[in-house]
């Protein structure tokens, strides 16, 4: 009888040990980022003003995980979130909501058309001095809208540039700020 109790205790301890090792291994098994997702830059709250001014908002994205471990769950949710953002062509991502198992964020594409002279493409009035489409037309000019995608950029003879660093995006891409009192 005494021998049977010892064998049962040893088996129980071994089973508990195996379960603990297995749970540790499973909690460390996290997803790896694909090459496009690895290029996505996560944004800090301080960068959002520049991002909203100079980048194109694509959509809200979600990332989910079914892992039981909270650290693995967060990592897997973030990986899924970045993969979903990469799938739609995002270059930047702001994680704004969620807990470990479900994260939500805003996906942006920070890109611009660089003209042949090295400056950022902007909307301009060809043939007249005007700053908006209506006054351009009234003055006999032709309004040339800013290139918002690779095809229209290349059609204008420019090069489509995906930017990793929002602070390095040309200031011409930000909306014109009015001076106080004017």
Image (tube, rainbow, N blue to C red):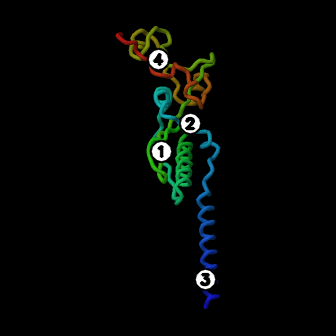
Q: Residue at x 61, y 91 (%)?
A: 1
The label number, if any, that marks residue 143 in the structure image: 4
| Residue 86 in the image, given as x and y percentages of width and height | 56, 42
**Considering only order in the chain, which callout, 1 or 3, is on the residue closer to the N terminus?**
3
Which of label 4 and label 2 is nearer to you?
Answer: 2
**Considering only order in the chain, which callout, 1 or 4, is on the residue closer to the N terminus?**
1
* Label 2 crowd (10 A; few <14 / some 14-19 / many >=20): many
Mark 1, secondary structure of its residue: strand
Horizontally, residue 173 falls left or right of residue 22, namely: left
Which of label 3 and label 4 is nearer to you?
Answer: 3
* Label 4 crowd (10 A; few <14 / some 14-19 / many >=20): many
**Considering only order in the chain, which callout, 2 or 1, is on the residue closer to the N terminus?**
1
The label number, if any, that marks residue 8 in the structure image: 3
Position of residue 116 relative to residue 56, above or below, is above
Residue that sits furthest to the front in the current view: 2
Mark 3, secondary structure of its residue: helix
| Residue identifier under label 2 | 91
The label number, if any, that marks residue 61 in the structure image: 1
Position of residue 9 relative to residue 150, above or below, is below
Whether residue 152 appears in this view of the structure is: no
Residue that sits furthest to the left in the current view: 181
Position of residue 40 relative to residue 115, above or below, is below
The label number, if any, that marks residue 75 in the structure image: none
């Amino acid at each position: 009888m005494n021998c049977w109790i010892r064998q049962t205790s040893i088996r129980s301890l071994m089973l508990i040990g195996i379960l603990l090792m297995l749970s540790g291994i499973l909690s460390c098994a996290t997803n790896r980022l694909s090459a496009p997702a690895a290029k996505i830059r996560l944004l800090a709250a301080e960068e959002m003003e520049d991002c909203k001014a100079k980048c194109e908002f694509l959509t809200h994205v979600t990332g989910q995980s079914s892992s039981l471990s909270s650290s693995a769950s967060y990592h897997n949710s973030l990986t899924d979130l970045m993969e979903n953002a990469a799938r739609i062509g995002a270059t930047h991502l702001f994680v704004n909501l969620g807990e470990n198992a479900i994260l939500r964020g805003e996906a942006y594409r920070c890109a611009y058309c660089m003209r042949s002279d090295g400056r950022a493409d902007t909307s301009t009035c060809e043939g007249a001095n005007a700053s908006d489409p209506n006054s351009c037309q009234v003055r006999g000019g032709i309004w040339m809208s800013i290139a918002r995608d690779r095809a229209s950029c290349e059609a204008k003879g420019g090069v489509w540039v995906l930017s990793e660093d929002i602070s390095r995006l040309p200031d011409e891409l930000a909306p014109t700020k009015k001076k106080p009192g004017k």
